[in-house]
Image (cartoon, helix red, strand yellow):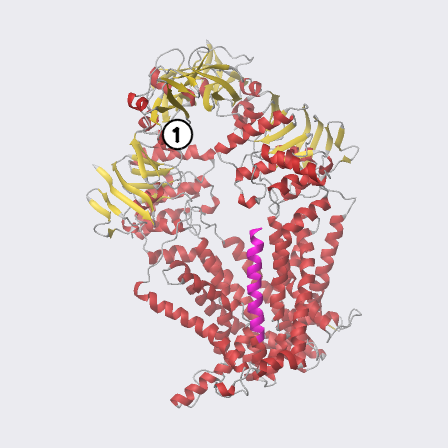
């Protein structure tokens, strides 16, 4: 059963369409990440689901129930949606203790005292905050504050959790740790999660499905493996992980790259060849060096970064990035060699 | 790791600057204040508390203390309510023209409150006030509708001019507050009313308190309004009683002693309020600054939108427009008391006080030159002291910081009294009754402003900017000249105007120090009014208002230019 | 151009000893990086070389000049040391435009105006800011401001360029770009560079040689990036350069036992004497298989991160991080689910005395 359903959700700010006819349904217990560069409309979408923004078109349902609808001009106020939400800047209340922060939504709901106590305690224990329950959240680190926010969202036992860049304000060091914590909590409580982030590795590690957005328009929806392995277009390819692009042109019926002829082992789709060429896209770690054949190139720069050796390689006038692991080093700086693209993907030139 | 200069004890530049700074602060600030305590507590060379208690238990002094307390508490309560309400209205609701309203609510900051008090006296004095007379004429009432010569009247007038202290702090806090703090409460299930009560108000409480304490501090030490509205009916507070004592008894020992005892009480109270304020600011100020900015949810006023707008406009009309118009119109009357008709009005009064009358011309000249010189001196002294405080690692810097903070908590009347004690021949210099004694007092009074502006500017000049110059090959002096001074210049300019403008309208200090030829604008307005020259008093007040508004707009423009740099 | 020779250097603030007995030589024309955790005293060392701090003991020589000598009380001020310096917060003067910022060192050196102009122009263009000479710093992005700072630092052709975490405030892409640019510039000008950072990737990418400093201000290892990365002198160096695993080993009756649960160790014996040792290795050194040779492990956590699969594996009670290229996992059927068992062996191991790993936490 779909837990949340967004149908043709649209939002405009003046002349700008921030979100354009977005459709998405999230299953019970599923974690969906909305991924995209800043200003792509992902946070606006989340805020529409939360009820902080009205819609310019479409509707949002929870189960069978409509919570936002343009047509009916009906918007259930955020306070009645029963969602848990975590904000980028923590939004924990500094004038209340950690305990009172977490108890707040329960007290608002006028639950019996004993239950408030029990559920707050439970939420605090799940987030390892029980020992600092009486302290002020201002005394906690960024990660600690975000755990308070998480506990507060958990305390009401919501069906749906909305997370708005919850890790962006943390030190990179704590980010990974918190990521695992969120994942563990989701496993335990089986919430449906809508997660907004601009960090692709965060989205990959946490979610069951990823929705990639650009300028208000959905580019692709799929599992992390699908998104990484078969990006729908050049934008998705570029946004997910490191990428190298080469323009493969057509001259006298032969394919060429950077001014030199090149015969790829697996040629691009014929419709793209007919159109006059295509983008050859590859991940830097899926490009191999070869002493003969391949696309002719010279090594412009080589930097050993520890785990990886980072190459900038010139193919004609184009610079391509190649990465090798330290167990498998490649040629030296200035050397001429060939490139082999292990798993090339092809995108139309107008992409 | 923050030294600008490597320790080079051989040169001793740091020590020279430090010594100079301490000397300036000791002479202009510490000595006068210490003399007050000395005079209050030492009788015939011996420490004597009993005598202090005796002075305080005299009915007159006791009543003044009580009045100060009553007035200050009243103004604090009303000012806090008014300021918080308007701040909330312009930041958290969909009130129309919020931006304009916000600017208008800050206008009272510009207007000298004793001029406002003067206007209200003209409007609401029990017998001759225009409003009271109008009501008595139209409705045939026997008595006035409102008597301004009361505690209530004084509190009302002071509230009008002091509420911006709370308004500015609370509006600022509400604007900077991260909207997600409120949104997270909404998503937790709280409605807007609950959020305001449980989240918003508690979060801005430190700002509210800090603003209230500022109102309290000002009201406690406030001279003008009480002098204009209270003295006539025998309502004295501490500053007005000090004034009365010093002025009427021509410097007799007993009255000076009463003055110093009162001043000591004032200093101690003010210091206590400052201490409380510091505590509130350092402990209670939550980190609530916004990260990602979305506009906070606005409360929809719906049916109340227009009534509240009308209310705001009426408030501004009554507290700003009405008194200002009254001043200008009374200033144009041929004789005070006449109805405002065209044939009763003339511009002659303005011409007379600007060009013909020696007394008012002197006053304007005195105020302008005093303000200018005081601002110039204080600006330079302030930059040196701030430099030592902010940028130098010198032993004993703590003393400097303390001395620098001291003037903040020393009210004007105390400074004036201290200056009289210090500069009337006690140390071989007698400049009493000259313009110089006012200058010295102005420097003491406004040093804190200069320190604040210059410290803020210097803190912006990160050490690495200077170090970058050193690494580029600049000597310490070259780095000062090419990097520090140009960067601090806007702060110095700010300091200059922060002193020059208030000095133009200063009353509290000058009224205790003026001599026959050394009236300032404020003193002239006040004494003309006392002498019954209401029309000329109003005309001069009108001119003062024009100068002030003109000056304020000049700085605003200047700072817009400076800030871009 | 000049070398830097530091001997017996000591610096303390009140009772707090930041550096002591520090010896270090940076060769002429070398790009040398000082790598260490924040607050370890590396910036203090840089400021000692720059002359913003005076040493409590020891000497610093730049080229032929002894610039600081605690015994002889020599202390040449920073402006006479012939330096270029770039700061973490850029320290671009906000009241001067780009050209004025860059030409200021030349102005101080009293270079004639026409030459000053030409050299400023050349420096501005070299950092790719041609056309922006008249802009104020407030009109530039962070990366552009840092370029101004860089141009200003080398315009006077200093003998030594000091860089204090200059790329910290830039975003990842820009940081990488600027890293290449600094390196290219250094090669072109042949200037000696002393670079301070806590970012191991920058340090490895940019340096000819680097030194690793620990929290107490002690230099743990000096060497080329390859030496430091491939042959870490101790557990601290290994753990500071990227993610690291430490697996405790103990000598049993029939040979070595691994992990808390003491299971028989299958790899080569520790290259150390004694009854206990610690195997240090990187996530990329872990060779994973379904049922090949090696120790038994159980996948506790599997995270797909795009180009890599990140596994947390329980090996005899000790958690071990493993990182494998995703495409390799897909091709070789190594996409483990959580809870599945696996086998691990190690491609590369560093042996440390027992207990050393704990001290790095």
Where's residue A79, x and y in %?
Answer: 30, 51
Where's residue C290, x and y in %?
Answer: 34, 15
The quarter of the image holding the N terminus of chain B is top right
Q: Residue at x 68, y 81 (%)?
A: B358
Where's residue A222, x and y in %?
Answer: 29, 30
Residue at the far front in the pictured view: A252
Q: Residue at x 61, y 44 (%)?
A: C93
- Which residue range is magenta in the image? B543-565
Residue at the far left in the pictured view: A64
Q: Residue at x 58, y 83 (%)?
A: B348
Considering depth in this image, is C255 or A251 the residue closer to the camera?
A251
In which quadrant of the rendered view does residue B306 lie?
bottom left
Q: Is residue B351 above or below residue B199?
A: below
In which quadrant of the rendered view does residue C262 lie?
top left
Q: Dot 1: what SS?
A: helix
| Magenta-drawn stretch contains B230 | no
Query: Overall secondary structure of the magenta stretch?
Result: helix
In the picture, measured across the screen, residue B95 lies left or right of residue B522, that is: left
Question: What residue did someone put label 1 on?
Answer: A238
């Amino acid at each position: 059963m779909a837990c949340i359903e967004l149908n043709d959700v649209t939002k405009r700010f003046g002349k700008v369409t921030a979100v354009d006819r977005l459709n998405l349904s999230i299953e019970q217990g599923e974690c969906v990440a909305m991924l995209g560069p800043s200003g792509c409309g992902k946070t606006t979408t989340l805020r529409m689901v939360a009820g902080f923004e009205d819609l310019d078109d479409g509707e949002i349902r929870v189960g069978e129930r409509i919570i936002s609808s343009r047509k009916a001009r009906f918007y259930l106020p955020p306070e009645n949606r029963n969602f848990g939400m975590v904000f980028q800047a923590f939004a924990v209340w500094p004038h209340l203790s950690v305990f009172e922060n977490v108890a707040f939504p329960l007290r608002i709901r006028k639950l019996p005292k004993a239950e408030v106590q029990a559920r707050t305690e439970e939420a605090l224990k799940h987030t390892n905050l029980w020992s600092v329950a009486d302290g002020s959240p201002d005394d906690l680190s960024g990660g600690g504050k975000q755990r308070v926010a998480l506990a507060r969202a958990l305390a009401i036992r919501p069906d749906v959790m909305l997370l708005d860049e919850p890790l962006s304000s943390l030190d990179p060091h704590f980010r990974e740790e918190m990521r695992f914590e969120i994942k563990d909590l989701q496993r335990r409580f089986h919430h449906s999660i809508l997660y907004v982030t601009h960090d692709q590795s965060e989205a990959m590690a946490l979610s069951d499905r990823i929705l990639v957005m650009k300028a208000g328009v959905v580019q692709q929806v799929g599992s992390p493996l699908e998104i990484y392995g078969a990006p729908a277009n050049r934008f998705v390819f570029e946004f997910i992980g490191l990428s190298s692009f080469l323009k493969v042109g057509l001259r006298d019926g032969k394919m060429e790259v950077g001014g030199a002829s090149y015969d790829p082992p697996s040629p691009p789709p014929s419709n793209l060849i007919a159109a006059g060429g295509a983008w050859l896209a590859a991940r830097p770690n899926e490009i191999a060096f070869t002493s003969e054949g391949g696309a002719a190139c010279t090594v412009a720069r080589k930097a050993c970064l520890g785990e990886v050796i980072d190459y900038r390689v010139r193919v004609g006038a184009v610079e391509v990035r190649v990465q090798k692991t330290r167990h498998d080093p490649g040629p030296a700086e200035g050397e001429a060699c060939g490139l082999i693209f292990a798993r090339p993907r092809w995108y139309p030139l107008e992409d | 790791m923050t030294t600008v200069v490597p320790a080079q004890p051989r040169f001793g530049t740091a020590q020279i600057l430090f010594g100079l700074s301490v000397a300036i602060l000791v002479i202009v600030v510490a000595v006068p204040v210490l003399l007050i305590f000395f005079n209050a507590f030492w009788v015939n060379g011996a420490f004597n508390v009993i005598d202090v208690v005796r002075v305080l238990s005299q009915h007159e002094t006791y009543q003044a203390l009580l009045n100060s307390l009553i007035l200050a508490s009243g103004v604090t309560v009303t000012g806090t309510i008014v300021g918080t309400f308007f701040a909330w209205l312009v930041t958290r609701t969909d009130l129309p023209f919020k931006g304009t309203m916000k600017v208008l609510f800050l206008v009272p900051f510009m207007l000298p409150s004793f001029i406002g008090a003067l206007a209200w006296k003209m409007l609401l004095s029990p017998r001759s006030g225009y409003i009271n007379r109008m009501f008595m004429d139209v409705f045939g009432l026997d008595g006035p509708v409102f008597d301004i010569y009361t505690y209530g009247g004084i509190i009302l007038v002071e509230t009008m001019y002091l509420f911006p202290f709370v308004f500015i702090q609370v509006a600022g806090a509400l604007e900077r507050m991260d909207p997600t703090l409120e949104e997270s409460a909404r998503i937790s299930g709280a409605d807007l009313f609950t959020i305001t009560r449980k989240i918003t108000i508690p979060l801005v409480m430190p700002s509210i308190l800090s603003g209230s304490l500022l109102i309290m501090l000002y009201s406690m030490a406030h001279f003008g309004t009480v002098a204009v509205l209270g003295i006539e009916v025998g309502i004295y507070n501490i500053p007005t009683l000090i004034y009365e004592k010093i002025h009427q008894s021509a410097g007799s020992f007993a009255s000076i002693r009463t003055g110093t005892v009162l001043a000591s009480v004032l200093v101690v109270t003010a210091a206590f309020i400052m201490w409380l304020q510091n505590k509130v600011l350092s402990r209670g100020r939550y980190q609530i600054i916004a990260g990602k900015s979305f506009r906070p949810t606005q409360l929809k006023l719906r049916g109340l939108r227009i009534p509240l707008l009308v209310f705001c406009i009426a408030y501004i009309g009554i507290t700003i427009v009405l008194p200002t118009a009254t001043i200008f119109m009374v200033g144009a009357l041929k004789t005070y008391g006449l109805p405002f008709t065209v044939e009763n009005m003339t511009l002659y009064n303005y011409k007379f006080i600007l060009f013909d009358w020696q007394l008012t011309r002197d006053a304007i000249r005195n105020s302008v030159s005093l303000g200018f010189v005081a601002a110039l001196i204080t600006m330079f002294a302030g930059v040196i002291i701030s430099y030592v405080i902010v940028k130098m690692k010198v032993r004993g810097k703590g003393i400097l910081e303390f001395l620098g903070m001291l003037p903040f908590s020393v009210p004007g009347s105390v400074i004036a009294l201290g200056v009289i004690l210090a500069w009337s021949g006690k140390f071989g210099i007698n400049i009493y009754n000259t313009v110089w004694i006012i200058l010295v007092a102005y420097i003491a009074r406004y040093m804190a402003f200069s320190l604040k502006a210059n410290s803020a500017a210097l803190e912006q000049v990160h050490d690495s900017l200077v170090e970058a110059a050193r690494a580029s090959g600049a000597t310490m002096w070259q780095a000062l000249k090419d990097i520090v001074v140009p960067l601090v210049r806007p702060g110095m300019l700010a300091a200059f105007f922060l002193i020059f403008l208030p000095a133009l309208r200063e009353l509290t200090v000058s009224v205790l120090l003026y001599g026959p030829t050394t009236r300032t604008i404020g003193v002239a307005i006040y004494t003309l009014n006392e002498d019954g020259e209401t029309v000329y008093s109003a005309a001069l007040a009108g001119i003062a208002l024009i100068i002030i508004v003109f000056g304020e707009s000049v700085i605003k423009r200047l700072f817009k230019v400076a800030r871009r740099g | 151009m000049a070398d830097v020779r530091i001997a017996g250097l000591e610096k303390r603030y009140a009772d707090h000893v930041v550096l002591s007995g520090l010896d270090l030589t940076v060769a002429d024309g070398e790009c040398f990086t000082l790598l260490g955790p924040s607050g370890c005293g590396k910036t203090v060392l840089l400021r000692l070389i720059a002359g913003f701090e005076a040493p409590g003991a020891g000497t610093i020589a730049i080229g032929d000049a002894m610039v600081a000598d605690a015994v002889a009380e020599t202390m040449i001020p920073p402006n006479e040391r012939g330096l270029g310096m770039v700061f973490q917060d850029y320290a671009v003067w906000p009241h001067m435009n780009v050209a004025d910022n860059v030409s200021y060192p030349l102005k101080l050196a009293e270079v004639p105006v026409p030459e000053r102009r030409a050299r400023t122009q050349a420096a501005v263009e070299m950092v790719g800011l041609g056309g922006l000479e008249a802009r104020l710093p407030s009109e530039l992005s962070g990366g552009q401001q840092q370029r101004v700072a860089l141009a200003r630092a080398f315009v006077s052709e200093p003998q030594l360029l000091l860089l204090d975490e200059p790329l910290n405030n830039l975003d990842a892409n820009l940081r990488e770009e600027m890293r290449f640019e600094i390196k290219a510039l250094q090669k072109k000008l042949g200037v000696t560079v002393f670079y301070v950072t806590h970012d191991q990737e920058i340090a490895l990418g940019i340096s000819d040689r680097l030194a690793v400093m620990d929290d107490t201000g002690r230099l743990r290892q000096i060497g080329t990036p390859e030496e430091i990365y491939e042959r870490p002198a101790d557990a601290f160096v290994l753990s500071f350069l990227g993610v690291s695993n430490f697996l405790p080993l103990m000598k049993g009756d029939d040979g070595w036992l691994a992990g808390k649960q003491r299971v028989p160790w299958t790899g080569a014996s520790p290259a150390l004497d004694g009854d206990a040792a610690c195997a240090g290795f990187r996530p990329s050194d872990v060779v994973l298989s379904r049922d090949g040779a090696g120790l038994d492990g159980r996948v506790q956590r599997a995270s797909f991160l795009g180009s890599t699969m990140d596994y947390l594996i329980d090996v005899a009670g000790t958690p071990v991080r493993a990182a494998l290229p995703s495409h390799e996992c897909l091709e070789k059927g190594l996409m483990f689910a959580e809870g599945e068992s696996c086998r691990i062996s190690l491609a590369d191991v560093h042996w440390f005395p027992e207990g050393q790993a704990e001290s790095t936490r």
